[in-house]
């Protein structure tokens, strides 16, 4: 499964809030050439594909990768910092990985 297909499937599974248990926020990075300059979205370097807001104010970061996809160096740094700060970080290769990582499946 491609990463874009996995992102779509995660949105389909959790987009309705999974019975009120989660609030998934999709984080998009982009760059586009404007008429006079390159415009980039503002984001933290290495930020994952999703931020899930969970009950009791907890959060989880979810990075979608294909079966062979690897984290880039800045993604690894973000993951390590998030974990050091006590957050949940899920490297998802399937929707089921997200469910397990959030304790829902």
Image (cartoon, grey):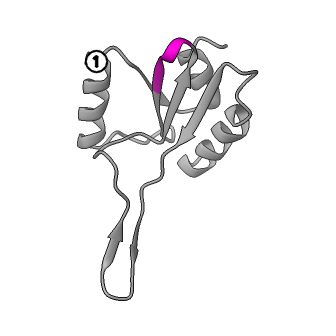
Given residues 92 and 88, the one toward you in this image is 88
Task: Give the residue drawn at x 30%, y 81%.
Answer: 37
Given residues 42 and 76, the one toward you in this image is 42
Q: Is 62 colored magenta in this rendering?
A: no
* Coordinates of residue 58 in the picture (x, y in percent): 47, 17
* Coordinates of residue 7 in the picture (x, y in percent): 59, 44
Task: Give the residue drawn at x 49%, y 17%.
Answer: 57
Position of the N terminus by quadrant: top right
* Coordinates of residue 12 in the picture (x, y in percent): 72, 40
Give the number of callouts.
1
Task: Give the residue drawn at x 62%, y 20%.
Answer: 99
Q: Dividing the picture into quarters, in which one does residue 86 lie?
A: top left
Is residue 42 shown above or below 25? below
The answer to whether residue 39 is left or right of residue 66 is left
Position of the C terminus by quadrant: top right
Q: Is 59 colored magenta in this rendering?
A: yes
Is residue 104 shown above or below 93? above
Which span is picked out in magenta?
56-60
The answer to whether residue 96 is left or right of residue 49 is right
* Coordinates of residue 74 in the picture (x, y in percent): 25, 42
Badge 1 crowding class, 10 Å Cα cut-off, few under 14, some 14 to 19, many 20 or more, is few
Q: Which residue is mark 1?
A: 85
Element class at badge 1: loop
Is residue 79 shown above or below 64? above
Task: Give the residue drawn at x 36%, y 41%.
Answer: 47
């Amino acid at each position: 499964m491609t990463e874009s297909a996995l992102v779509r499937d995660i949105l389909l599974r959790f987009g309705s809030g999974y019975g009120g248990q989660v609030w998934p926020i999709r984080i998009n990075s982009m760059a586009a050439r404007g008429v006079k300059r390159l415009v980039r979205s503002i984001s933290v370097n290495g930020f994952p594909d999703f931020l899930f807001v969970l009950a009791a104010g907890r959060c989880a970061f979810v990075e979608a990768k294909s079966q062979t996809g690897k984290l880039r160096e800045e993604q690894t740094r973000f993951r390590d910092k998030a974990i050091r700060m006590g957050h949940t970080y899920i490297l998802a290769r399937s929707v089921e990985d997200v469910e397990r990582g959030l304790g829902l499946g």
